[in-house]
Amino acid sequence: MKALLYTPSLPRFFAARALGKRFPVRALPLALKELPPPERPGFRRVRVLLSGVCGSDLALLYGKSPPSLSPFFSFPAVLGHEILGEVEGVRVAVNPLLACLERGLPPCPMCQQGEEGLCQNLAEGALAPGMLGYNRDLPGGWGEWTLAREERLYPIPEGVPDERAVLAEPLAVVLRGLRRFQPWPEEVLLLGMGTIGLLTLRLLRALGYGGRVYAVAKHPHQAEKARAFGADRVFGSAREALEERARRYRYLLFEGHRGGYRGVVEASGSGRGFREALALAAEGGRVLLLGAPGVEWADLSPFWFKEVGLVGSYTYTREEFREAVALLPELSGLEGLVGGVFPLEAWPEALLSKGKALFRPNVA
């Protein structure tokens, strides 16, 4: 089968980390390969229809992933953990987790509680470390075929377009985060109007949130989408949002603020976004970290000086994934987040595209 294989390279890692998006995309450690069709007892073979490019994939390719996560990935690997597939003519969303169930191990304490996303055996058992898309034993969605246990396959409701259905996995991440953020504050500020931020906004309204939602969007097309998805006001920058709400104080060369927003969701996945979220949270407010910043500097004083609370979300339970799939028929417009659909051969263009990029590995 054709697949995009990521093979780590320390020289390219350090060069990409230093240069960021200035690093030549064709020099990234990614290559289109011909691999044997995957097989493994107890797993179903899934024909990949669409697979998304996630911010965490780009962080890995450009050297921004936290080094402390390295033992829980295994390479070389076919990337792609946002997967819409097909099994015997039925469209399915693939839950990419590889927990105790897949590893042939008795359930760890977290898996016993249903919290397979927090499995304590990610680097143990019969499989290499990591979930689908970060695992050398099982291919992710950037290939023509993947493998999954029957329990990880969720049929897509009728009438849901493919470009919306492939967003089930990131939608499940957002759903879990919003559940952990309850009770919801009377107002929420969303930082970052990329895929995760817009999914958060759309899902908040779909779940019946009636409070005021503010959004920070860098680009006009993001601002337009935010308004369409239910934002009460859109700011062009975090500074603009801060000046709207907080009082500024200065001493010598230093600046501080009082006031802000009761709830802040950081969805950009950047260190800068995390620092801005802490600054924007009001005294006694809370921050939900949905993005995935790596090793970054941050002023931690808001945690004690303003008593700001912090909650994070990484994956989901089986029930949260199932609920996300069941919500897809109600979330019309999500397919508008897709910026382009690409064959595997066009991977450099996909990684440089604006908006949500998808791969269609099996091109008729």
Image: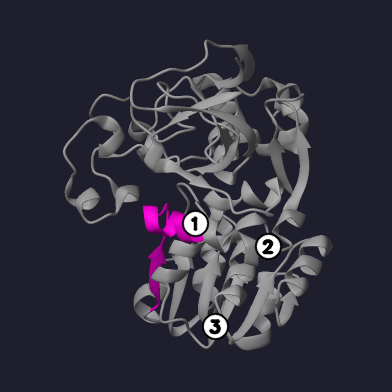
Query: Who's the residue at 76% across and 26% down the image?
Result: 346
Kind of residue at disc 3? His
Q: Image height check: is 104 above or below 190?
A: above
Disc 2 to disc 3, C-alpha distance: 24 Å
- Please say whether residue 310 is one of the residues in the magenta stretch: yes
Q: Amino acid at mark 2?
A: Met
Which of labels 1 and 2 is toward the front? 1
- Is residue 44 depicted above or below 151 in this figure? above
The kind of secondary structure element at disc 3 is strand
Range covered by the magenta-colored residues: 308-324
Q: Quadrant of residue 108?
A: top left
Q: Nearer the viewer, residue 119 or 300?
A: 119
At x 52% / y 10%, what residue is drawn? 36
In the image, residue 104 lies in the stretch drawn in magenta: no
317 sits to left or right of 356: left
Going from N to C along the chain, the mark reached first, 1 or 3, is 1
Q: How many marks?
A: 3
Q: Name the residue that disc number 2 marks.
A: 193
**Can residue 325 be seen by looking at this rendering?**
yes
State the SS at label 1. helix
Give the mark nearer the N terminus: 2 vs 3.
Answer: 2
Find disc 3 in the rendering and name its residue.
257
Question: Mark 1 and 2 residues: CB-CB less than 8 Å, in contact?
Answer: no
Residue 185 marker: none
37 sits left or right of 108 in the view: right
User: Dot 2 lies on which element?
Assistant: loop
Q: Earlier in the sequence, mark 1 or mark 2?
A: 1
Image coords of residue 109 (percent x, y): 17, 50
Q: Which residue is found at the position 43% from the left and 24% from the top?
A: 138
Residue indicated by mark 1: 172
